Amino acid sequence: MPGKTGKNSDTPLVDNPGEENDGGSVGSEPSSAGPQDPDAAGGDLDALSVEAEQQAVYVEAGVSDDLLALRDAVEATLLAASGQIEVLSDAPSTQGIVGVGIGLSDPDTVALGAGGPGEPTLTLFTESAMPQEALLSQLAQSAGTRALSSVPVQQVPVGAVDAYSHRARHRPAPGGVSVGHVAITAGTLGSRAIGLTAPWNNRHLVLSNNHVLANSNAGRVGDSIIQPGAADGGRHPGDQIAVLARWVPINFGGAPNFVDAAFGWAWHERIRGGQYYLSGGAPAYYNTGTAPLAASLGLIVGKSGRTTGLTQGRVTQIGVSVNVNYGGGRVALFRNQIAIQSVNANPFSAGGDSGSLVWHWATGVRPVGLLFAGGGGTTFVNPIGTVLAALNIRLF
């Protein structure tokens, strides 16, 4: 545990919001508190490590250079369609294609082109089922016809992909429960965290999405974060657990995004480690690991979320680029994301589960991603290594 310990107490003497301690008081270091990239040197090294790990996953899965090139070409058209538009299907460059990624051939999806069962395939996420001719026409506009003869393609209708918005009051608050910026409805508290550099390495933090904690870029440093979120009855100041501290701004057009992520600076006695779930109707908790795990195709994962609770899913696509609708005509392209589908008839996620920590359903329970969007039975997740590097934090 970080911080110092008193002689007669096991409680760490960490900084709380509004207090002065070794880490400094609120507002004393505005360059550290605002929406910004992490410290350049450490952040760049972490980003290079994440990229190398992702490339190793592609090699292990047998992903061809032609498949990656076609994925990149479709992503370029998606980026052109992001920004401020009325509805996603109005964008002429994509005509109903909302995302692209790399998966494995599935007999239950619409397969086009060459390729056998289980081979790496280009996955196109669409607003609705599209005729084969229309789908191929859109691909040809993005990348020409040459690549289509050598790359298998499948279609996964997901509807419009929206940024998603356990509901009781919890003290101390664990991961997996309702939380939110005071001006939004509610999302999910993902995990407790701590910074890698001063002053954040002496402060307890709560991790979730930008659109959950920072109100989709509209928040200000010091804004109230409440648990439960307002949609579940939370109110300021009685339900405040943290203040908004840092977020990665979401770009609406012009540049791709890699994470929808933010953290709040919490009163350490108001939060706790672990994830909440119901076991036979009774409250229960489990702990996750702290070392990130890169997603691989077929990986079985789980999460605890505000709306759907504890669920299990399977990684169906990696290297996903997807346009996400944030409402009000705002659309943002996200690159190198993870797609997950449920392993059973129950949904893996629903609105209000945004911010949930996604983890490997196996010994070690290693973190895999941060849930942020979904539609049509498919959930989209930021790789957790990218999230931690962007915010310059670690889980604990």
Image (cartoon, rainbow, N blue to C red):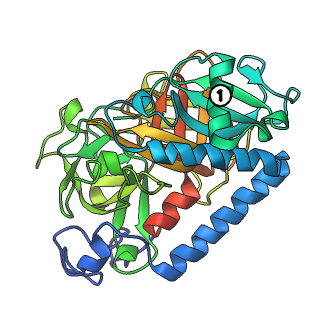
The residue sitting at 32% across, 46% down in the picture is 211
Left or right of residue 288, residue 63 in this image: right
The residue sitting at 51% across, 37% down in the picture is 93
The answer to whether any part of residue 49 appears in the image is yes
Q: Position of residue 255 (x, y in %)?
A: 45, 57
The residue sitting at 68% across, 35% down in the picture is 140
In the image, residue 1 sits, relative to residue 317, either above or below, namely below
Which one is in front, 294 or 276? 294
Left or right of residue 119, residue 222 in this image: left
Which one is in front, 153 or 263? 153
Q: Residues within 10 Å of mark 1 (few under 14, many from 20)?
A: few
Quadrant of the rendered structure where residue 251 is? Answer: bottom left
Q: Position of residue 383 (x, y in %)?
A: 57, 52
Left or right of residue 265, residue 19 in this image: left
Q: Which residue is mark 1?
A: 137
Which one is in front, 65 or 20? 65
In the image, residue 99 sits, relative to residue 23, either above or below, namely above
Quadrant of the rendered structure where residue 53 is? Answer: bottom right
Q: Going by the picture, which residue comes out furthest to the left?
A: 237
Q: Position of residue 73 (x, y in %)?
A: 64, 47
Which one is in front, 171 or 115? 115
In the image, residue 102 sits, relative to residue 160, either above or below, namely below
Q: Going by the picture, which residue comes out furthest to the right?
A: 116
The residue sitting at 55% across, 28% down in the picture is 378
Quadrant of the rendered structure where residue 129 is? Answer: top right
Q: Position of residue 11 (x, y in %)?
A: 34, 67
Element marked by disc 1: helix
Residue type at tag 1: Ser
